[in-house]
Image (cartoon, rainbow, N blue to C red):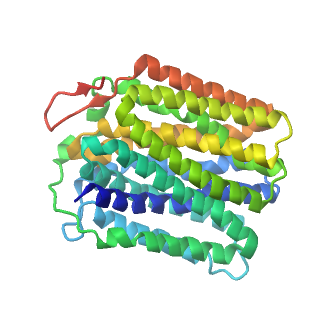
Amino acid sequence: MKTPAKLGLLSSLYLSQGLPFGFFTQALPVLLRKQGMSLPAIGLAHLLALPWALKFLWAPAMDRYGSETWGRRRGYILPLQCLSAALLLSLALPAAGLDTTLLMAAVLGVNLLAATQDIATDGLAVDLLAPEERGWGNGIQVAAYRVGMIIGGGLMLAVFDAVGWRPTFLALGGLLLLATVPIGLYREPPSEPPPAQSLGLSWWLRRPGAGAWLALLVVYKAGEALATGMLRTFLVDSGLTLTDIGWMLGGVGFTAGLLGALLGGGLVVRLGRRRALLLFGVTQAGAVLLYALAARGTATLPLLTAVCAVEHVASGMATAAVFTAMMDACRPEHAATDYTVQASLVVLATGGAAAVSGFSANALGYSAHFALSAALCVAGTRFVALTFHPPRTVSPGAAPEVSP
């Protein structure tokens, strides 16, 4: 399979994950704030993404068992995406509208399906991409996921504002079905599952350098997650309309996030993993600090739009770099499990930071909250400088290597 075809297939899969997740993480906080929900309650709603942090528990079984007819990875991805689309479409059925309890249950359900699909998708990505393709592959991954989030969050927020909840969920479900077509047409080559006894997580955790590397994954993106956990409520409280927020996230965020992910994916190959993480981490911290400065004065639409663009570029670059390094740390024969362990830690850290973001913003105010978040971004980048030695395994049975 040629590189453009690989990148096209992976783009459709990560776009599929971003569509519903974007609505529930970007549009939903705005709608809840418009209804008068408190900042701490909105922050705690991020805990509904818990399946993304716990997916490492069932990843080994998915690595070990798969369909011979449909494909080891495709056999999971295809039905899970169809179930996610069906759940989104079902939210358009109630004639009287959605109550908060039903919506929150749907958020949890879609997160469970998408997180499980992500295990197989990440395994497929590691299987497909050669080492020299991983920079661009992860750039495409982050870009497609962000495009999905922007369409599901920013664009669907504008649709919601214009025509209501029913067309919004019909559009979300329809887009997800459309994005399922490429994996439906793909024919996965047969592959042998790894031996069951080597799938234990304890083996991975005993790898040389694993402790410091896993700690780095916890701290690197947590500061940004603390900031963006309250970004949508900040925009609401700054007086922006739903259409303003939808345009900012859907138009500016789409373009800037795409540019940042592709730029980061391309540069990580030239700079090397360590230098890319350091440079992009500093850029990420500076972008978050701009939110603190904007919150100190009159937050006008042009100013917030400019800051939003910078933050999306910086975040896309940093995410592409850390995902590429995570892929390097995977054993080829256990790609889904190894990548999922790392991804779960990132989600656990970022989800926890987002969950407490409401308490921080409520106690400190938006400006001090964003300043604290920027300081945590600096601390995460400093940790890279001190500890960056991700474990790498080049082949089954080979001794782990340490990245330069």
- In the rendered image, is residue 394 in sight? yes
Is 326 on the left or on the right of 157, as rendered? left
Can the viewer see residue 39 in this picture?
no
Which x, y percent locates residue 17?
Answer: 47, 59
Point out residue 230 in the picture as x, y percentages from the top left corner: 70, 44
Q: Where is residue 401 shown, x and y percent of the image?
A: 23, 26
Residue 404 point in image, percent of width and height: 30, 23
Q: Residue at x 19, y 35 (%)?
A: 394
Above or below 271: residue 143 = below
Q: Which of 333/148 is in front?
A: 148
Q: Residue at x 41, y 58 (%)?
A: 11
Look at 44% across and 55% down and name the residue there: 115
- Is 60 placed left or right of 375 in the picture? left
Residue 203 higher or lower than 171, as above or below: above
User: Which is nearer the eye, 397 or 321?
Assistant: 321
Q: Residue furthest top?
A: 386
Locate residue 161: give its quadrant.
Answer: bottom right
Which quadrant holds residue 1? bottom left
Q: Residue at x 56, y 27 (%)?
A: 282
Q: How many marks?
A: 0
